[in-house]
Amino acid sequence: MEPNYRRCLSCRQVGPKKQFWRIVRLFPSGQVQLDEGMGRSAYICPNPNCLSTAQKKNRLGRALRASVPEALYQTLWQRLASSNEIQKTN
Ligand SMILES: [Zn+2]
């Protein structure tokens, strides 16, 4: 895999890092958050299929070896909804 390429934990598609959402389990607190921070990270495509697979099968929790708060998934669903609205207006 090339540097700065990452793999989606749901569909296993590989692509440039910036095309994915990044979820991080912070070191040393173990708190799980989006986008920024030092620690163990997982990547996922910003689409409904990959998000729902990650949620239903707990792919994210397994990848990070942490429990992922429901609120984090909610934030991602909201991001999807708002990005769809942007596309509609274009
Ligand atoms: Zn994916």
Image (tube, rainbow, N blue to C red):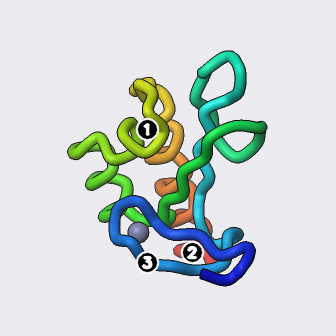
- Residue at 70% of width from left, 46% of height from top? 35
Which-is-in-front pick, marks 1 and 2?
1
Q: Give the left or right position of residue 62, taking residue 80 as reference.
A: left
Q: Amino acid at mark 2?
A: Gln
Task: Tell me the amino acid under the disc marked 1.
Answer: Tyr
Task: Look at the picture and state if 53 lies above or below 11.
Answer: above
3 and 1 marks in contact (CB < 8 Å): no
Up-down relation of residue 62 to residue 10 (above or below): above
Distance between mark 3 and mark 1 Cα atoms: 20 Å
Q: Nearer the viewer, residue 14 or 72?
A: 14
- Residue farthest to the top? 29
User: Is 52 located above or below residue 20 in the figure?
Assistant: above
Residue 73 location, x and y as percent? 43, 38
**Distance Cα–Cα, label 1 vs label 2:** 21 Å
**Corner quadrant of residue 89:** bottom right
Q: Quadrant of the C terminus?
A: bottom right
> If the image is split into quadrants, where does the N terminus sit?
bottom right
Per the image, the residue denoted by label 2 is 87
Residue 13 badge: 3
Question: Mark 2 or 3, which is nearer the eye?
Answer: 3
Disc 3 residue type (three-letter): Gln
Q: Which residue is mark 1?
A: 73
66 versus 1 height, above or below: above
Residue beneath the point at 50% across and 69% down: 7
* Residue visible at 60% across and 47% down in the picture: 41
Q: Secondary structure at mark 3?
A: loop
| The CB of the residue at mark 3 lies under 8 Å from ligand 1 | yes
Between 44 and 65, the residue placed more toward the observer is 65
